Image: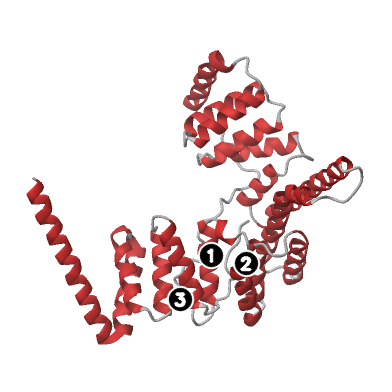
Amino acid sequence: PKTTPSPLLTNQMPSHIPRKIQSKHSIQQGGKKNRGSKSQHLHDSQSHNEFASQFENDSLDSMLTKVLEYKSNDNLKQALKMAKFAHAKHPDSEDAVDMLTELLYETNQMDRCINQLRRAVEKFPNTGAQKYLMLAEMETSHDSLARYRKAIQIMIHDLHQMQREQQEANGGSSLNEEQVTIMEPMQSAIAEAFCSIADLYMTDLSQEEDAEQNCIAALEEAQKFTPNSSHVLQTLASCRISQQKFDDARQIMSQMLQSSPDFVDTPDQFKMISGQILMELNMMNEACAIFQSMRREGDMTTEIGYLSGVAEKLNKNYLKALKLFNKILPDAHGKFRSTVKAEIMDCKKLGGEKVKKEWAAHEAELKKQEEQEERMDAMED
């Protein structure tokens, strides 16, 4: 879902913290279609011929399995070629369309992806929620809202059908634990779509007369499907901040961190936004803990490093903040580099003489290590 922190800022939240980690792709309705260049059509034709000799007689399932195999090996170029071939051979297959649009999106071919999605909506209007969810992410305002609502309608229909099939398999009795587990991914997807609608009413549609009521209504629907999921609780906390119910928001975020079983597995973007919300609520220890865990789990990006530094600075851990800001400084450019430098100066000022001395000792130790490494390199040469 397009979850963002609340649009409101508290006094503890620096205005330069990015409010949205990843922007959506805005598209104009009724604009010119991107028909592609002659070279692109020639390339597609060559790709088709390349696969025709090898996979001409394969089933669709076999072709899509091959696409997934290429993807699992991070070979998106070959995966896309195979997806195009599968779609050309099976133009009436919604599975082939879904795979192709997904690969177009992942390879950043947005115009072609959008055109393909819109054709799919015309061809398969009442089945397959994925195309509506993808378009909802790339469109804005009421267009996005309509896509989410259609996706939810399809997913709820599919969920009810799954429940009926499982009950029939049980001879009409209640679902067992294993069958309930089978339903959970669909329930989560429905809840996240409702969260995205709530988010729209806090962003694109925030000036609508009934925005607050519609936001709350969407969240109430989301809670019917996955009441304790991280996405639902985070969006609910953002809503409470928008209503200036900060104590309620703190309680909800605490519940998310302590009780949501899926938080550990959420994407980095979601965790970064959670950290921003926690800073907004002056829950600095919790925000620092999230960013610290992200630094341990993988390579530290400039975004993670910057937000980590801000959180540590606001938590008055000025030396730790200085180390984080200096670590990302070589990779910061333009206005962002100026912002990082300003943070470094601010940390030194706020930390006083104690932090200045500690930082000087840290720099001296770093210089000593560099000199030792240079001597080792010279000895090896």
Q: Secondary structure at mark 1?
A: helix
Please name the residue that numbered disc 3 is placed on: 14
On the image, the x and y values in percent for residue 328 come to 33, 62
Disc 2 crowd rating (10 Å Cα; few below 14, some 14-19, many 20+) is many
Q: Name the spot of residue 187 as percent of width and height, x first.
A: 74, 53
User: Which residue is denoted by mark 1 in the rendering?
Assistant: 273
As shown in the figure, which amino acid type bears the numbered disc 2?
Gln
Q: Does residue 215 sit above or below 39 in this rendering?
A: below
Residue 315: image quadrant is bottom left
For label 3, count other residues whose C-alpha is less than 10 Å away and answer few (under 14), some (14-19) or many (20+). few
Look at the numbered discs 2 and 1 and tell me whether their residues touch, using CB distance below 8 Å.
yes
Where does residue 178 sit, x and y in percent of width and height? Answer: 75, 48
**SS at circle 2:** helix
- How crowded pointer 1 is (Cα within 10 Å; few <14, some 14-19, many 20+) is rated as many
- Left or right: residue 63 versus residue 219 is left
Q: Amino acid at mark 3?
A: Pro
**Residue type marked 1:** Ile
**N-term mark: 2 or 1:** 2
Q: Position of residue 74 (x, y in %)?
A: 47, 37
Query: In this rendering, which labeled residue sits more in front, label 2 or label 3?
Result: 2
Q: Is residue 330 left or right of residue 297?
A: left
User: Residue sitting at 61 percent across and 78 percent down?
Assistant: 250
